[in-house]
Image (spheres, grey):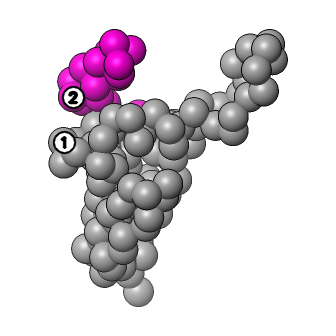
């Protein structure tokens, strides 16, 4: 009996006119997002009405750590890519592995 779930898939999801690509082979998954702007839109959460006060950061477990823990439990490696460059790898070590591309991409998004 296998110790982890293995999948084979290629999926393109259109979100707000942008193609998000998901590919999987065995226990390795790649999610490619076309640009930093699309990633920022995906992670921004629901829109807030104008003049609404900024909500405080919620307490509790870190969402990235939760994804990493789930990937490790399932025996998967999830590679999050933006424009074909790896940003974060989940499931390889105890914490998500954030690359320099992610840091530079986030800094660059502040200037747009």
Q: Position of residue 21 (x, y in %)?
A: 32, 63
Q: Which residue is mark 1?
A: 85
**71 or 51, which is in the foreground?**
51
**112 or 58, which is in the foreground?**
112
Give the residues in magenta: 94-112
Q: Would residue 75 be visible to someone looking at this image?
A: no
Cα separation, mark 1 vs mark 2, equals: 7 Å
Q: Is residue 11 above or below residue 76?
A: below
Name the residue: 33% across, 50% down.
Answer: 33
SS for callout 1: strand
Cβ atoms at labels 1 and 2 below 8 Å apart: yes
Dot placed on the residue nearer the N-terminal end, 1 or 2: 1
Q: Quadrant of the C terminus?
A: top left
Q: Residues within 10 Å of mark 2 (few under 14, many from 20)?
A: some
**102 or 83, which is in the foreground?**
83
Residue 42, disc: none
Residue 5, image quadrant: bottom left
Question: Is residue 1 highlighted in magenta?
Answer: no
SS for callout 2: helix
Q: Which residue is mark 2?
A: 101
Left or right, 104 with reference to 37: left
Name the residue: 29% across, 49% down.
Answer: 34
Question: Is residue 110 highlighted in magenta?
Answer: yes
Q: Quadrant of the N terminus?
A: bottom left
Q: Position of residue 111 (x, y in %)?
A: 34, 13
Name the residue: 38% across, 35% down.
Answer: 37
Left or right, 19 with reference to 66: left
Q: Position of residue 99 (x, y in %)?
A: 24, 29
Q: Would residue 11 be visible to someone looking at this image?
A: yes
Report the number of numbered marks.
Answer: 2
């Amino acid at each position: 009996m296998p110790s982890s779930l293995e999948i084979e898939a290629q999926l393109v999801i259109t979100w707000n006119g942008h193609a998000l690509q998901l590919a999987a082979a065995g226990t390795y998954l790649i999610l490619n997002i076309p640009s930093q702007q699309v990633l920022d839109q995906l992670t921004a959460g629901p829109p807030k009405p104008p003049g609404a006060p900024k909500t405080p950061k919620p307490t509790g477990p870190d969402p990235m750590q939760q994804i990493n823990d789930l990937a490790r439990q399932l025996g998967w490696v999830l590679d999050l890519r933006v424009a074909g460059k790896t940003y974060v790898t989940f499931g390889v070590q105890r914490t998500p592995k954030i690359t320099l591309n992610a840091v530079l991409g986030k800094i660059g998004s502040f200037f747009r």
